[in-house]
Amino acid sequence: MPSATTPPYAAPSPPDFDSIPELDWSLVASGDPIDRKLFLSKLRNVLLHVGFMYLKNHPVPTELVERIKQHTVDVFNLPLERKLKMDMIDSPHFYGYNRMAFERTAGAPDIREHIDLGPDSPSTYDPSSGPLYRKMRPGPNPWPDQEDAPGFKEDVKKYIATLAPLSREFIGLVAEAIGLPRESFYQFLEAADVPQGRIKMVHYPPTDTPNAQGVGPHKDGWLTFLLQVNDVPGLQVQNHSGKWVDVPPRDGTYVVNLGKGLQHLTHGVLLATTHRVLPPPPGVHRYSCPFFQDVALDVPWTPLDVPEEVRREVGARGEVVSDVKPLEPAGASDGWQYLANRIKSHPATGLRHYPDFARMVLGEEIFLKESATLDKLLAKRDAEI
Ligand SMILES: O=C(O)CCC(=O)C(=O)O
Ligand SMILES: [Fe+2]
């Protein structure tokens, strides 16, 4: 239904999606300009009307993907005390292990444990030389012991170094697909030669708790390349009328989706689509490994001039229903906003490494509550390792 704000010349709205479209990277890899055009026109349609896609025939070597899948399963099978040696709470870079149900989305605990890892560069932060948010990146990863996880470190570093340029090429195609110069989003990224990108290895155990969430409804921040590690469904995407659509694992593919930053920068032309993960049924464990493209910390998000004809097509989309309540303006991102978001997701880590800023971000009540439990949390953790 066209809304009251739909311009009279808008194209008719395409039907709402009830499955996730698939794009074929071989159309880009072939080097044939006609193939590329075809890819771009399909991409445009998906970006404007779905915001989520499978990507097949991607160039990431199968052996590397398989090793990452195996590491993801194996690392969570380590005893808790070994995982806690990689505790995120020790990392001002927000890299490391988060124990089960430690993180919350939409006010409820996520029944998952996860390990966040970056390109593993030494910290260069010097308090006298720049804003505090620069302390977040670059930084080293906490790693499992080599005997506990042979090849883990080498494979993760290689994997991030492979996904970073692929995601960069992809975002160039996103710009082209909506009628912008290919380089349009590069100003918001780190320079191509800076090691960058973050992965999150995730384990969703089965749970008896009624209405539990693997991860609650949310929108991602920027651009995600998700690897569904094993053959267990659970990921769902919310379509425009609010219905949840399954995104079952599909061998040899990535699930690619866009986040709030890209939606903001394009006046809503690009869609940050709401998604969630349901916990697996009894006896079944689900694993995944998203890669998140890093954005530069020093660049404010000033929206771009998307061509009028593209905006008009989006006008036909009408209202998009979402279970995510907007808590703050979606855009306005530079390093401060990014740090604030990390602190909100990981208050204990934020409090420990950025106490003054965390106090502002969390508000006095939560700050005092979290501070009171931080010492207990650390003592408990230290007793466990
Ligand atoms: O585990 C998944 O399939 C998706 C996880 C997710 O959406 C996230 O961590 O942002
Ligand atoms: Fe997500």
Image: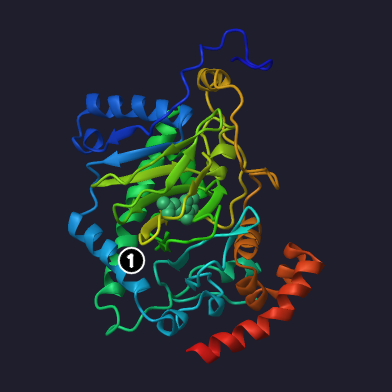
Q: Position of residue 215 (x, y in %)?
A: 51, 54
Query: In this view of the protein, which residue sits in the foreground, 127 or 158?
Result: 158
Q: Is residue 57 rendered to the left or right of residue 367?
A: left
What residue did someone put label 1 on?
72
Task: Please tell me whether residue 245 is drawn above or below residue 167 in the rendered image.
Answer: above
State the residue at coordinates (42%, 72%).
Answer: 121
Would residue 5 be visible to someone looking at this image? yes
Q: How is the image coloured?
A: rainbow
Query: In this view of the protein, which residue sits in the foreground, 83 or 299?
Result: 83
Q: Is residue 56 rendered to the left or right of residue 112?
A: left
State the residue at coordinates (48%, 69%).
Answer: 138
Q: Is residue 321 rendered to the left or right of residue 20?
A: right
Q: Position of residue 17 (x, y in %)?
A: 44, 27
- Examine the image and state in which quarter residue 133 appears: bottom right
> Which type of secondary structure does the marked residue at label 1 adopt?
helix
- Please identify the quadrant where the N terminus is shown: top right
